[in-house]
Image: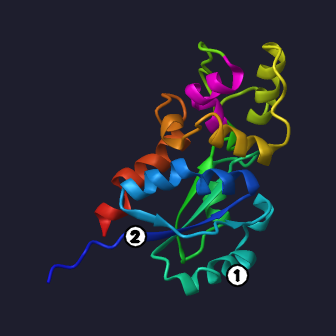
Amino acid sequence: MVAVNRKIKVGFIVEGGSEKVIVESTQFRDFLDGKGYELVTPVIDAKGGGNLLPQNIESFVARFDVEAVDHIFVLTDLENEPSVDAVRQRIQNESIQFSFVAVKALEAWYLADSAAMNSWLDDSNFHEAQPEQTQTMPWDRLKEIATERGKRGPGQKISFAKKITKHHGFSLVHAAQHQNCPSATELVNYFTQGIADAD
C-alpha cells in the first residue's frame, strides 16, 4: 500500500496580533497548503517583540508539544534593532526551525502589496518604491498616505490587519513579488523551496 504524502505541520510564534492575523489568514493558509504544509492553529501571539526572549520561548514552544508539530517558526519585526541577524540571535532556540524578520515592521509588507493598497485607497496607481526603507515606521507611512489621498486613516493595527486581508486581499505572496521587499520574499521563498525539499 502506498503511503499518502502527509503535509508538514508548521507552528508559528509571532510578535503580536497583526502578525497573528496575517499568518492565520485564508490567503497564507492556502499558500502553505499548496506547498505541502499545514498550519497548526492557533498561532501563538507573544504579545510584543520583547517577549521573544529565550526565557519565554520555551513555554511558547511547549504549547506545540501536543500538536505533533514538525517545524516551529517565529515571525517578528526588526523595529530599531541593528540587524536581522541580531534579532535571530536574540530569539535563537533549538526547537525553532527559522525566524522570519519583517524589515522595519510587518506593515512594510502591506506597502509592498500594491493591489491590496490600491483596493484600500480605492485607487489604481499606488506603488511604494521602497517599502522597507520608509523614512518613518511603515505604520506611520500608511497614515501619511491616507492623509495625502484624503482617505480615512488605517485606525488600529490589528483591525487594519483584518481589514486589509479580508476586504482588500492582502497576500504575502503579492508582497514578496515586490522587487524591494526582501524580507517578504525570503519567507515566501522559504516555503516555496524550503524545508519540504530539504527533508
Name the kind of residue labelled 2 in the image: Ile
Tag 2 residue: 8
Instruction: Identify which residue is drawn at 59% across, 74% down.
Output: 93
- Taking the view exactly as shown, the residue that stands out farthest to the front is 167
Rendered location of residue 21, percent (x, y): 67, 53
Residue extending farthest to the bottom is 66
Location of the C terminus (image quadrant): bottom left
* Residue 49 vertical placement versus 102 (above, below): below
- The quarter of the displayed image where residue 50 is located: bottom right
Q: Position of residue 168 (x, y in %)?
A: 63, 33
**Residue 109, percent from left and from top:** 62, 38
Q: Which residue is mark 1?
A: 59
- Tell me what residue is drawn at x 77 percent, y 20 percent: 145
Q: Quadrant of residue 33?
A: bottom left
Identify the amino acid type marked 1: Ser
**Image point 45% across, 66% down: which residue?**
38
Q: Which callout, 1 or 2, points at the residue further toward the start of the chain?
A: 2
Crowd band around label 2 with a 10 angstrom C-alpha radius: few (<14), some (14–19), many (20+): some
Majority secondary structure in the magenta region: helix
Q: Say whether residue 35 is left or right of residue 176.
A: left
Coloring scheme used: rainbow
Q: Which residues are magenta?
A: 108-122
Q: Does residue 113 show up magenta in the picture?
A: yes
- Contact (Cβ within 8 Å) of mark 1 with mark 2: no
Q: Nearer the viewer, residue 126 or 79?
A: 126
Point out the image quarter for the N terminus: bottom left
Report, in whole angstroms, how far the alpha carbon at label 1 lies from the one at label 2: 22 Å
- Residue 184 in the image, given as x and y percentages of width and height: 53, 42
Secondary structure beneath dot 1 equals helix
State the residue in front, 54 or 174.
174
Say which residue appears at 74% left-offset and 46% top-offset.
79
